[in-house]
Amino acid sequence: MDKHETTRPPTPQLGVNTLEPYWMPFTGNRHFKQNPRLLAAASGMYYTSDDGRKILDGCAGLWCVNAGHGRAEITEAIRRQAGEMDYAPSFQLGHPIAFELASRITANLPGDLDHVFYCNSGSEAVDTALKIALAYHQAKGDHRRTRLIGRERGYHGVGFGGISVGGIVGNRRAFASALLPQVDHLPHTHDLAKNAFSRGQPEHGAQFAEALEQLCALHDPATIAAVIVEPVAGSTGVLVPPKGYLEALRRICDKHGILLIFDEVITGFGRLGAPFAAEYFGVLPDLMTVAKGLTNAAVPMGAVFARKPIYEAFMQGPENAIELFHGYTYSGHPLACAAALAAIEIHRREDLAGRARAISGYWADAIHSLRDARHVIDLRNLGLIGAIELAPRPGAANARAFEAFLECFRRGLLIRVTGDTIALSPPLIVEKPEIDRMVETIRTVLAAIS
Ligand SMILES: Cc1ncc(COP(=O)(O)O)c(C=O)c1O
C-alpha cells in the first residue's frame, strides 16, 4: 500500500471538547472546533489527514515546505544535531554550525549581501531588519532618519514593527493605538481595471513607485530610514509587481539615501524560479528578510541578510562593545541551523529553483486555463505562485473563497485563501499531473459553490 494511503483511525483524544484549550492562530476558532480539519502526517506532495485521506498540498504548507514534505536528509540532520548538542546560547558564545550555515548561505547571495543575522520567524526577521535599518543610520550619525515606509496590503508578519509597516487592515485594526509612529505607506499595485488576467508581471503600474517621491516630498527624504516591500506580495492575495516597479523603487531609494528592504519570506528559496526575488528581478535590496523555506519549515528559523556596508557601519567603537543590542535566545538554534544546512544542500543538489523555473510555464498555462471558470475575475502568476481572484459574494465578502477552501479540502486538495483570492504555491517538486489535479479540482469546486 502506498504510504499516503495508510488509513489511520481519527486520533481518539481529539473529541470536540478537547479541542477547546488551543487558541488557534489566524483561525475562526469556534467554526474550526465545530468541524475540525486535522493533518496527521506528510510526505512529498501530500498530507495525510487525521482520518487517513490523502491531501495534495497546493501551498507548500504555508508557502514554506519548498522541497516537499518529510525530506529524510533534513530529518536526519535534525536528529543528529539534537543528539550532539541540543542548544547553545549565541550571546557572547558561538557554535560551529551557526558559522558554517552563515558561510554557506552568504556564499550564494546576490551582490554584497554577505552577512546574516538569525532569528526564528518571518515576523522576527522583519522587526530585526527594521531595527537594523534604524540603528544603521544612527551608527552613521544620520540621526534624522527615523521614518519607515511600508505599503498598503503588505504583509510583514505580526510583530508591532511588521503590522506597522504592513498594510493589511484587519491585522492592524485592533492594535491601532500601539502601532509604530513615523510610518507611512506606498499605495498597493493592484490595478484590476488595467491588468486583469496578466500573465507574469503586469504591464501597467510602474508609476505606483513614484508615490515614494511624493512621500519624500511630504516628509523630507532625509527623515526616511527605509522602505520595506514584498517583491511579490503574497498573503494579501498575490500581487505581482508591475514591470519596472521594483527598479523604480531602487532608483528612488538610491537617490535619497534610503535603505530598501525586500521581505523575501515567501519569495526566497526558489519560489520564483530563481534563488531569490532579488535575482529574479535583478534588483538588489540593502536588507533581505527570509524564513519559511530556509529550513524547509522543519524547524522554525528566520534571518536577515545585510549588505557589507551595513554590517561595517556597526563595526566601530571599542572592540569589546556590543554593536547591536538585539537578538533572541534561539538565534542560530543548532537544530534550525542543521535543518537549514540540509535544506540548502537539497536545493543545490536538486536545483529546485531551476526545477521551478522549468515547470513555471506549464504552471502559468494551468492557472490561466481557469479564465472561464465560474466566479473568476482575475488570474495572476509568477514562478510557482498562482492566484485566482473570485468575485465577492454580494454582502458576504470572503465567504465564497472560504467555501472553496473547505470544499477543496473535502476533495483532497489544500489551497490557501485570503480575502476572495485563492493563493497557490506548491512545493517546488510538483509534477505536471499534480498541477492538472489542482486546477481541475478548483474548477469543479468553483462550479459547485454559489
Ligand atoms: C512576506 C512575509 N513576511 C513575514 C511573514 C511572517 O512570517 P512568520 O509567520 O514566520 O512570522 C510572512 C508570513 O507569511 C510573510 O509572508
Image: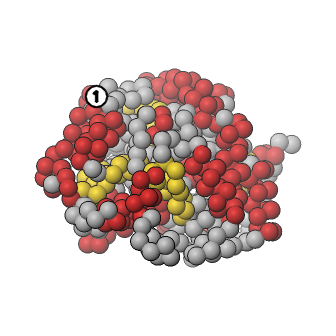
Q: Which residue is mark 1?
A: 204
Give the farthest residue toward the right: 1
Q: Quadrant of the N terminus?
A: top right
In depth, the one of 349 and 293 nearer the eye is: 349
User: Hey, what amino acid is under mark 1?
Assistant: His
Residue found at x 81% / y 46%: 3
Residue 397 visible in the current orientation: yes
Residue found at x 68% / y 49%: 343
In the rendered image, residue 34, in percent from the top left (x then y), is placed at 55, 64
Image height of 37 relative to 199, above or below: below
Which quadrant would residue 219 be assigned to in this image?
bottom left
In the rendered image, residue 310, in percent from the top left (x then y), is placed at 41, 56
Answer with left or right where residue 224 lies relative to residue 386.
Answer: left
SS assignment at label 1: loop
Answer with left or right where residue 219 lies relative to residue 377.
Answer: left
Judging from the image, the colouring scheme is secondary structure
In depth, the one of 169 and 245 nearer the eye is: 245
In the rendered image, residue 223, in percent from the top left (x then y), is placed at 21, 59
In the rendered image, residue 366, in percent from the top left (x then y), is placed at 53, 26
Residue found at x 58% / y 76%: 92
Answer with left or right where residue 339 lies relative to residue 364.
Answer: right
Image height of 357 relative to 88, above or below: above
Q: Quadrant of the C terminus?
A: top left
In depth, the one of 325 and 87 nearer the eye is: 325
Which quadrant would residue 291 be assigned to in this image?
bottom right
Image height of 268 relative to 50, above or below: above
Residue 154 visible in the current orientation: no
Image height of 215 relative to 302, above or below: above
Residue found at x 68% / y 39%: 348
